[in-house]
Image: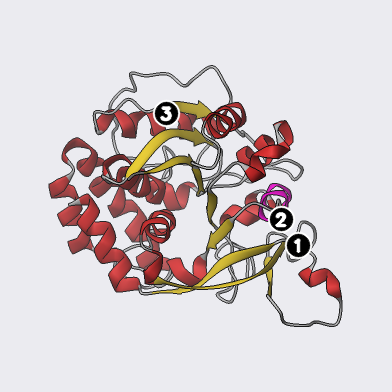
Amino acid sequence: MTTPIIFDTDPGIDDAQAIAIALVHPEIELLGLTTTYGNVDIDTATANALLLSELAEQEIPVAQGAAAPLVKAKHPAPAHIHGGNGLGDIELPEVQGKALSSSAAEFLVEQVNARPGDITLVAVGPLGNLAAALQLDPSITGKVKQVVIMGGSIREGGNVTPVAEANMFNDPHAAARVLTAGWPLTLVGLDATHRCVLSPQDMDRIAAGQGRLGKVLADSYGFYSDFYRQFLGIDGCCPHDSCALAWLMRPDLFTTARGHLTVVTEGFAEGQTVFAPEGRPFLDERWSATPSVEVCLDAQGARVVEWIVDVLS
């Protein structure tokens, strides 16, 4: 039995690590990559998605999607974290393939309707593509198997503001729509991903096991880990996006809770995810008015990283 997924991504160094997992894991059927702005602009995101598949010698459909937020002004891409080309400013081969003519939202709707009850959507960037798919066909909420989102923060605080995680902050209006759509959803946020550190030794093992793709992962890792060393004082990097796939395939490595999510869309706390645990009364019912979802509150960091390395080596 395999798990069919569509991976929505803004590659991105940690995205590249996760895409590598999706490409090689024997129990994951990667139906396609849909791209969004975020870590890089949309054209770079699409080129990187195509390139990573080519380096793994696989032909994976790539559909280009959101170039900007739904409502708010677009912030510059974080070149100091991922490099101007999204992969640590290393020299990259020329991309051979092209994206599909259909948009990311159209591809998502088409695939979900073709295989109702079968497909998991894994989204690790700003959520404009999923929001657009919901706009095109609201019925997909009852046709996906599940939705896994890397983003947000329940107790951990933010990474781009004191309260907001980057994907939520980049497009809070899209996030609010997606997280409250009423489909089976799990949020894998900073409470889990910050427990996981991919060390230089781990990356050496990955590089040795992944050929041309492994070299790109290893070379870009150096740029990414320099950022983490400078700003968080750790020797390695948090493999945020890989954690979404780790939860999908190994949920036993995570601590979760059910409850109600909202996303602040305006003002000082824009992008903050607000979680009301299921069954807990508050002063006002509005905090519990959204559909019940699952959120990750913790992860067995060393075991998650071990899983990542084992898959990729």
Type of amino acid under label 2: Thr
Residue range highlighted in magenta: 173-179
- Residue 180: image tag: 2
Magenta-drawn stretch contains 225: no
Q: Nearer the viewer, mark 2 or mark 3?
A: 2
Which residue corresponds to the image point at 71% horizontal and 55% vertical from the top-left? 180
Q: Label 3: state its secondary structure.
A: helix
Type of amino acid under label 3: Ala
Type of amino acid under label 1: Thr
* Residue located beneath label 1 in the image: 290
Earlier in the chain: of badge 2 and badge 1, it is 2
Earlier in the chain: of badge 3 and badge 1, it is 3
Q: From the top left corner, tell me how far across and down residue 141 is, in percent.
A: 66, 45
| Quarter occupied by residue 130 | top right
- Residue 47: image tag: 3
User: Do residues under tags 2 and 1 come within 8 Å of each other at their CB atoms?
Assistant: yes
